[in-house]
Structure formats: structure tokens, C-alpha cells
């Protein structure tokens, strides 16, 4: 870490601080004292990263103690005290109290590193001065924390950066060699990661063919679950024809005033249905060995259930339509009620079949299972070698459950062993609206268990070798999003589509902290050029915001020096590349060798006020956004559609407008394995 240093000429008067060795700085610029300063600087230059972090932590502790009891005269230009003259030191008694502790800290953390008493060196005082601006900024930041920090940053730091730092410390405590820190866990071949990466890549090409969810029935006793939509009881009425009585029934049965009449009504519904046929060779065929179920046509019944009340079609559109119309947002799905079916135990079933499309625009079917107790009757949907098994019996009595799938999917209904499985079937048609626009549901209601990638992701999370100590997973979005457009950032993650929506929904359902964030690929030539010495200060300053949220600071030196090392190691992966090549190590994923800046929130496109005449690219980049260059993120997928993020005034042979682009990515915090075991039990994985 390099910081601002103060240079003195022979004519400068050195600052005086009486009563302490640290302050004995008379003649700092004289010829007699230049040699100790150069010798000390040489020793510091030879220190490894770890030792330098320990040294700086001790010095920062000293300044933190001192700044608690002194007044600071700020520099008008930089608002940073870069010279000792600006300090009004405390009493000799206070200085004598602090100095021995500084020496003890140095000797404890850095035994046998320096020759002689380092505190006596005038060079040491100047080296201390290089840390003063950083510690002062940290002190000032803590004072202004409530005004400086975006409230959303708390979750970001606790869920994204803290796990990386914790894992960093664990590895540091186990092995203090530089090489073990450089490689980190990301260079270790991991079968679970490989399998998950292939699944994600496969889903990007052929996302789910089926999706579904459940809707709880409202009751006075049950508390409302804000993660699951709820519905009032469903009222069902039917009459099979003129001269036949009309019937009314409320589902679940417990919501009827008279339980005996409700049971009789359910039995009447099953009896009033006629045997259901199925399509074969362009004809309707009746074969009770192949399909044993009853049906009512739409004109014979009414239902209080309404698809639009639960935004089911909007959610289905986001899963199924992106595969059919890549890159388009204008298509919509229309649902047409087709039949009411009753599968009765102990023998109701429907063997393997593929639905016959009723017209060219039909793309699939939607099945809504009404709340009525039954056992068995699993709905199994298959497509291109993949299979999803939906067991609705467990929650059949008190929930509405639904599933939508493509017309070319093979599916079957296993034998109902008891009870009545009552379903509404809709044909799904694709339409193009007259006004082209993006429709985004107010909430995501898809049940991840209905998605084809659920099993693979769950298996990975339950594998103890998959991020045993926890980690951060970054997945580049496979679909294009105008994430820098004004107002669109507020629509994410609900505006996710296809495979992206699948992954986000699954992580959310499993209790994994997951966000959508903009990502810069810092391997671009512009950002490679931007990684200069200035980044050192910016990076460490930037993570001071993290320190202000956690119980880490100069007062806790043993943890604090690890943080300093952590913040410096986070900024570049070039040493990883070099070590891997030197030792013939194959990187797990080609993106592990690349650097990515991750934004702390989605923001609209902007034009920066900075320009390259006065600022570095990194300063311009950090000026309007909050970005983190994270080591420890395992990246999967390839960077997708890039959107203009911001522009700035660039200078080459002549002035021009420079542009930075970002793409959207899903960032998930994978907890340690023992935490995942607890989540699995608590959330019924």
C-alpha cells in the first residue's frame, strides 16, 4: 500500500512533538538522518504483503488512538490532513501511554523483522505519516456513516463481501504462505462446480419446458406467508344440462357450512362428469385403461378461480416464451378454459401422451389443481430427455397448485390411490399485442420445484464438497436486459426471463441470498489501462465502508491486519494467472482469470462529469457508482448483452467521448455446508 508522503527540504522546519520518541523529528531532512530513513524504507520495501499489512495495522491503531483526543485542521483542497503541522497533539502523559503499546504491537506481530528500536527512527515517523490520510478518512467516515452509506449496502456487505473475507481469514489462519492465498479455493477442481456449470450452460440453451407453483387458501387461523400467494376458497358450480339440478360446492371442503352435504356434493361432481377421451391419430378415443377420468365442458360449470388474480400467465410468459421468441418482449400468452377433469381414487390415471394442439398458435397447456384431498396422482412431464415429477398430493387439501408446459411435452398422471383430483385445464395460445411493450409481473410466483434445473442445483448445494466453507457464485445472465435504461432497474429481478428467472427463483426458494447486479469486465483494454497505482488507495478507501459496518477496526489489530491484506488482494487477479502458468495449473473456468467489477446496485445510464485530463479512469468509474473488484467469486456462463453504463470525456490525440459498458449478472451467496444443512431442514428442500 502506497500513500501520500511528505517531502521536506533543508530549509523546512520539522514539526515538534515533545515527550515522545515518535515525535523526535528534528532535522528530518538533514544529511545525518537520510541514511536511517533510506535503510528503513528499504526494509519496508522488502517486507512481504502479510508483514506490510501487519505493520500498517499497528500504525493505523496508533493514529486511531491519537485521533480520538486531538483536533484536526483540514486541508482546504483535499480535506485530508497530510502534514503533522495540522495536528494538535495531546498531553505528554497521553503520548507516553500510547507509544509503548505501539511498540508492543509491532514486536508481537513482527518479531525480529526490524533491527534496533524502529520507533526511534525519524524514518519511521515519516512512514507513519503515509497512513494518516487513510485513518483520518476512516474516522470521518464512521462519523458520517448514516449519511454516507446506502441502506441497501448493509445486506450487500453482510451477504456478499463478509463471506469472502471470512473464508479469506480461515485460509490465512491455516496457511500463511503467499502461494496458498494467491491460488485460493477457486483454482481447485470441483466436480460439483463442473456439473452445475454444465447445467447452467444447458439451461441457457434450452430452459425449462415446465413451470408451476402453489397458492395457499386463506384462513382465519393461518398466518399469511408473504412468500406464497393466497386465495379465498374456490366456489364451484355446475349443471350438466336442462332438467338436471344445479350444484354449488366450496373447496376446500372444510369451508362449507355443512360437512356432510359437502362430501355428498364432491361425490355428485365426480358422478356428473362423463368419461374423458383423448386425442389419437386426429380422433377422440375413449379407453379407460389408458385414461380413466371424468370431464365437464366449460359451458357446464363456473368457478370463482381467476388466473389474472395471481399473475400466473405473466410468470408463465417469462419462463416459456423466451425459448420460442429469443430477444423479443412483445409476445403474450392467452389462456382458454378447456375442461374440468376429475380423477377419482383408487384407479384414476392418464398414461403417457402428448397433447393434440387445438390450433396453430397453441404453445402449451396449463393445469390448475383445485384444493381437494387425494393421494398419488403425480404429474410427470418429459421433454428432450429431461423429466420433472410434480407431487401435488402432499398439499392437495388446502392449496391450489398449477403447472404449465409446452404442447410437445410428453406427460402422464400416475394412479390416484384415494380421494378426488379436480383440475381445470387451459389451452395456452401465443399472441402479439397491438401495443408493443414489456409486461413485468409484480412478483415472482413460480415454484422452483417445478423447474427442471431445481434438482441439479439442490444436489450441488447438498454436496459437502461444493463451497464447503461458503462462497460467492456469479452467473452471467443468458438473456438481454436494458438494465441501464431509466426505470428498468426497478423491474429487476421480476423482469428476468427463462433460465435467468429459473436460477434466481431457485436460489430464493432455497433461502440463498441472491441479487441482480451490473458487472464490468475489467479485462477490457480501457480498464486494464485504468488499473494504476491510484487504485491502491481507492480500493482500500472503498472497503473502509465495509469496515464501518462490521466490528473490524484498528482497535482489533489481529483481525484488522487481515482486512488490510484482504482489501489489497481483492483488486487484481494477475498474480493468480502468473502462479497458475508457472505451476501448470489449469484454471477451473476461463473467467476465473478475469477481473470483474461488480456494482452494488443497478443504476440508469449517466454521463460522468469527470474527464481524463483531471482524473484517472478508475476515479471516473468510482465517482458516480459504487463498485467492488471481488476476488473469491466463482463465475459461470459467459458475459451477455452489454448496455451503455456511462460516458466520460476521454483524451487521445484529441478529445472524444469514452464509453463504459456493463452486463447483468446474478450474484448468489452460498452459505457454508453446515448452514445449508439447516436451511434444507427448515425450508423443506
Image (cartoon, rainbow, N blue to C red):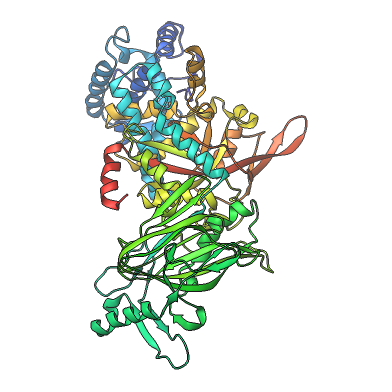
Q: Nearer the viewer, residue 68 or 516?
A: 516
Q: Name the quadrant containing residue 177.
A: top left
Quick one: 399 or 650, which is closer to the camera?
399
- Looking at the image, which residue is at 30% across and 17% down? 21
Q: Quadrant of the N terminus?
A: top left
Toward which corner of the image does residue 565 lie, by quadrant?
top left
Answer whether residue 441 is visible to the viewer in this image.
no
Indicate left or right for 111 with 435 as reference: left
State whether residue 201 is above or below residue 370: above
Q: x, y percentage for residue 425?
A: 48, 69
Q: Along the line of sight, which residue is nearer the eye, 296 or 362?
A: 296
* Residue 482 place in picture, x, y as percent: 61, 51
Residue 30 versus residue 94 in the image, above or below: above
User: Is 141 placed left or right of 383 in the picture?
Assistant: left
Residue at image coords 39%, 41%: 669
- Give the residue displayed 58% in from the left and 51% down from the top: 483
Q: Residue at x 31, y 66 (%)?
A: 346
Point out residue 440 in the picture as x, y percentages from the top left corner. 55, 62
Identity of the residue furthest to the right in this view: 654
- Which x, y percent locates residue 381? 46, 54
Identify which residue, 305 or 25, lies in the foreground.
305
Amino acid at each position: 500500500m502506497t500513500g501520500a508522503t511528505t517531502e521536506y527540504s533543508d530549509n523546512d522546519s520539522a514539526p515538534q512533538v515533545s515527550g515522545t520518541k515518535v515525535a523526535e523529528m528534528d532535522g528530518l531532512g538533514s544529511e545525518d538522518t537520510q541514511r536511517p530513513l533510506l535503510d528503513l524504507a528499504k526494509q519496508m520495501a522488502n517486507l512481504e504483503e502479510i508483514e506490510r499489512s501487519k505493520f500498517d495495522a499497528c500504525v493505523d491503531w496508533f493514529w486511531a488512538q491519537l485521533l480520538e483526543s486531538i483536533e484536526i485542521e483540514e486541508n482546504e483542497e483535499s480535506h485530508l490532513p497530510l502534514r503533522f503541522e495540522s495536528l494538535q497533539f495531546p498531553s505528554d502523559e497521553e503520548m507516553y501511554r500510547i507509544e509503548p503499546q505501539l511498540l508492543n504491537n509491532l514486536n508481537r506481530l513482527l518479531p525480529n523483522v526490524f533491527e534496533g528500536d524502529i520507533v526511534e527512527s525519524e524514518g519511521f515517523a515519516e512512514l507513519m505519516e503515509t497512513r494518516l490520510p487513510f485513518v483520518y478518512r476512516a474516522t470521518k467516515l464512521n462519523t458520517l456513516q448514516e449519511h454516507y452509506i446506502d441502506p441497501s449496502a448493509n445486506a450487500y456487505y453482510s451477504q456478499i463481501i463478509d463471506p469472502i473475507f471470512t473464508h479469506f481469514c480461515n485460509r490465512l489462519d491455516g496457511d500463511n504462505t503467499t502461494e496458498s492465498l494467491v491460488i485460493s479455493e477457486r483454482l481447485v477442481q470441483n466436480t460439483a462446480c463442473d456439473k452445475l456449470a454444465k447445467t447452467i450452460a444447458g439451461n441457457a440453451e434450452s430452459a425449462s419446458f415446465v413451470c408451476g407453483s402453489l397458492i395457499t387458501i386463506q384462513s382465519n387461523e393461518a398466518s399469511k406467508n408473504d412468500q406464497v400467494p393466497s386465495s379465498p376458497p374456490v366456489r364451484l358450480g355446475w349443471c350438466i344440462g336442462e332438467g338436471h339440478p344445479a350444484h354449488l360446492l366450496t373447496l376446500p371442503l372444510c369451508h362449507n357450512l355443512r360437512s356432510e352435504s359437502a362430501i355428498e356434493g364432491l361425490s355428485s361432481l365426480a358422478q356428473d362428469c362423463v368419461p374423458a377421451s383423448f386425442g389419437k391419430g386426429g380422433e377422440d378415443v375413449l379407453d379407460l385403461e389408458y385414461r380413466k377420468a371424468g370431464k365437464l365442458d366449460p359451458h357446464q360449470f363456473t368457478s370463482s378461480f381467476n388466473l389474472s388474480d395471481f399473475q400466473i400467465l405473466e410468470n408463465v410468459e417469462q419462463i416459456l416464451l423466451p425459448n420460442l421468441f429469443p430477444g423479443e418482449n412483445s409476445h403474450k400468452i392467452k389462456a382458454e378454459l378447456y375442461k374440468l377433469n376429475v380423477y377419482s381414487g383408487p384407479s384414476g390415471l392418464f398414461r403417457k401422451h402428448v397433447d393434440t394442439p387445438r390450433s396453430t398458435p397453441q404453445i402449451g397447456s396449463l393445469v390448475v389443481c383445485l384444493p381437494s384431498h387425494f393421494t398419488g396422482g403425480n404429474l410427470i412431464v418429459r421433454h428432450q430427455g429431461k423429466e420433472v415429477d410434480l407431487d401435488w398430493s402432499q398439499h392437495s387439501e388446502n392449496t391450489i397448485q398449477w403447472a404449465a408446459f409446452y404442447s410437445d411435452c410428453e406427460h402422464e398422471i400416475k394412479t390416484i390411490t384415494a380421494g378426488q383430483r379436480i383440475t381445470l385445464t387451459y389451452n395456452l395460445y401465443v399472441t402479439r399485442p397491438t401495443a408493443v411493450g414489456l409486461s413485468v409481473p409484480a412478483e415472482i410466483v413460480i415454484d422452483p420445484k417445478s423447474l427442471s434445473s431445481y434438482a441439479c442445483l439442490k444436489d450441488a448445494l447438498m454436496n459437502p464438497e461444493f463451497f464447503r466453507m461458503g462462497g460467492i457464485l456469479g452467473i452471467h445472465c443468458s438473456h438481454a436486459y436494458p438494465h441501464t435504461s431509466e426505470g428498468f432497474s426497478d423491474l429487476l429481478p421480476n423482469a428476468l426471463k427463462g433460465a435467468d428467472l429459473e436460477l434466481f427463483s431457485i436460489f430464493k426458494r432455497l433461502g440463498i441470498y441472491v441479487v441482480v447486479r451490473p458487472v464490468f469486465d475489467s479485462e477490457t483494454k480501457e480498464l486494464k489501462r485504468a488499473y494504476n497505482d491510484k487504485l491502491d488507495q481507492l480500493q482500500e478507501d472503498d472497503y473502509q465502508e465495509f469496515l464501518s459496518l462490521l466490528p473490524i477496526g484498528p482497535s482489533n489489530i489481529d483481525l484488522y491486519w487481515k482486512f488490510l491484506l484482504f482489501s489489497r488482494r481483492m483488486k487484481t487477479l494477475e498474480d493468480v494467472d502468473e502462479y497458475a502458468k508457472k505451476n501448470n495449473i489449469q484454471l477451473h473456468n476461463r473467467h476465473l482469470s478475469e477481473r470483474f467489477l461488480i456494482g452494488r446496485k443497478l443504476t440508469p445510464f449517466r454521463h460522468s462529469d469527470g474527464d481524463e485530463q483531471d482524473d484517472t479512469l478508475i476515479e471516473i468509474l468510482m465517482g458516480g457508482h459504487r463498485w467492488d473488484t471481488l476476488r473469491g467469486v466463482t463465475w459461470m456462463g459467459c458475459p451477455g448483452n452489454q448496455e451503455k453504463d456511462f460516458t466520460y470525456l476521454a483524451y487521445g490525440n484529441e478529445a472524444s467521448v469514452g464509453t463504459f459498458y456493463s452486463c447483468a449478472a446474478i450474484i448468489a451467496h452460498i452459505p457454508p455446508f453446515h448452514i445449508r444443512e439447516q436451511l434444507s431442514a427448515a425450508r423443506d428442500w
